[in-house]
Image (cartoon, grey):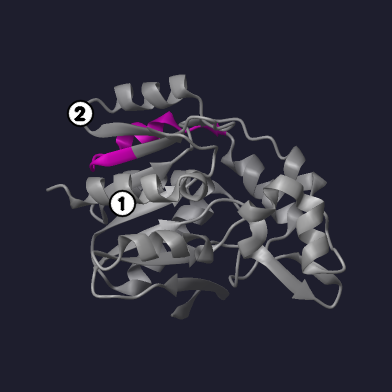
């Protein structure tokens, strides 16, 4: 089920995958949207009811004037409060992973457990891939062909418009968002006090194994690391393994 709510006049969209399970909030990464979590929602049902946000500038949510760290965290807080579900676990990938751990650190009473997928506490994002993306293509197949091996990771965001086929996100907005993602965020990471699972793709070009282990060390006793044979988008490259480690982690007594 798709739902909508407004924050300061901006529309935000989300997908509630439904079911009788306990709510799990999910936050996607750049180039994606809520629908990217459909396979995970199916794998975690019926124990968990995944509710995924189309973050600002993505999916069916409105574009925004700003894509700063505080902006994204405020959206997550508004999303959570709109749902009226009380404290819940939060999962996020990449951009969504940082949004998730910053939200958990700043609103500890709202997050019961945290899953962070392949993003560090220090980020040095390269947006050259973003600026190389085709703005439009004459057909869906042409857009996929132009993307090559990256197509399966972006296809949930394909959209048709009067100009042909493009994306549900804007290239310039994405660059602004990636620039705002960069920096040292150790203060937010170490401020999280709920049980945390950090998932690292062993072939990731975003998070190194050394940095992932340092993140666990700095949260001694509160965080654990799962390393899976995948690139940066672990939930895509290792769907079954990703769902299994998330399910096992969330099912443990708090």
Q: Foreground residue, 100 or 43? A: 43
Measure how far apart labels 2 and 1 are at the Cα level. Answer: 20 Å
Q: Tell how many labels.
A: 2
One can see residue 168 in this view: no
Image vertical order of residue 37 relative to residue 180, above or below: below
Residue 21's place in the image compared with 247, above or below, is below
Element type where label 1 sits in the image: loop
Contact between marks 2 and 1 (CB within 8 A): the answer is no
Q: Which mark is residue 107?
A: 1
What residue is at 47 percent from the left and 33 percent from the top? 120
Mark with earlier residue (2, 1): 1
Q: Residue furthest front?
A: 240
For the residue labelled by badge 2, is the local secondary structure a helix, a strand or a loop?
Answer: loop
Q: In which quarter of the image is residue 164?
A: bottom right
Residue toward you, 104 or 220:
220
Which percent across, then down, holds residue 12? 53, 71
Residue 221 badge: 2
The residue located at (69%, 48%) in the rendering is 150
């Amino acid at each position: 089920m798709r739902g909508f709510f407004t924050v300061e006049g901006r529309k935000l969209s989300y997908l509630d995958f439904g079911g009788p399970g306990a709510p799990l909030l999910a936050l996607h990464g750049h180039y994606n949207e809520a629908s990217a979590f459909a396979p995970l929602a199916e794998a975690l049902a019926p124990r968990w009811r995944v509710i995924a946000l189309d973050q600002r500038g993505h999916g069916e949510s409105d574009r925004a004037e700003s894509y700063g760290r505080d902006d994204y965290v405020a959206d997550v807080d508004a999303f959570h409060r709109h749902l009226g579900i009380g404290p819940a676990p939060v999962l996020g990938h990449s951009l969504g992973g940082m949004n998730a751990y910053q939200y958990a650190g700043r609103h500890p009473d709202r997050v019961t457990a945290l899953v962070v997928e392949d993003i560090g506490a220090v980020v040095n994002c390269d947006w050259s891939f973003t600026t190389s993306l085709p703005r439009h293509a004459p057909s869906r197949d042409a857009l996929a062909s132009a993307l090559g091996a990256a197509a399966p990771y972006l296809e949930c965001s394909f959209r048709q418009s009067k100009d042909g086929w493009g994306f549900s996100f804007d290239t310039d907005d994405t660059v602004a968002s990636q620039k705002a993602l960069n920096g040292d965020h150790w203060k937010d990471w170490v401020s999280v006090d709920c049980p945390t699972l950090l998932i690292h793709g062993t072939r990731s070009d975003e998070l190194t194994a050394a940095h992932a282990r340092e993140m666990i060390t700095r949260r001694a006793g509160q965080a654990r690391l799962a390393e899976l044979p995948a690139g940066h988008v672990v939930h895509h490259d290792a769907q079954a393994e990703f769902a299994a480690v998330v399910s096992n982690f969330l099912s443990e007594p708090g």
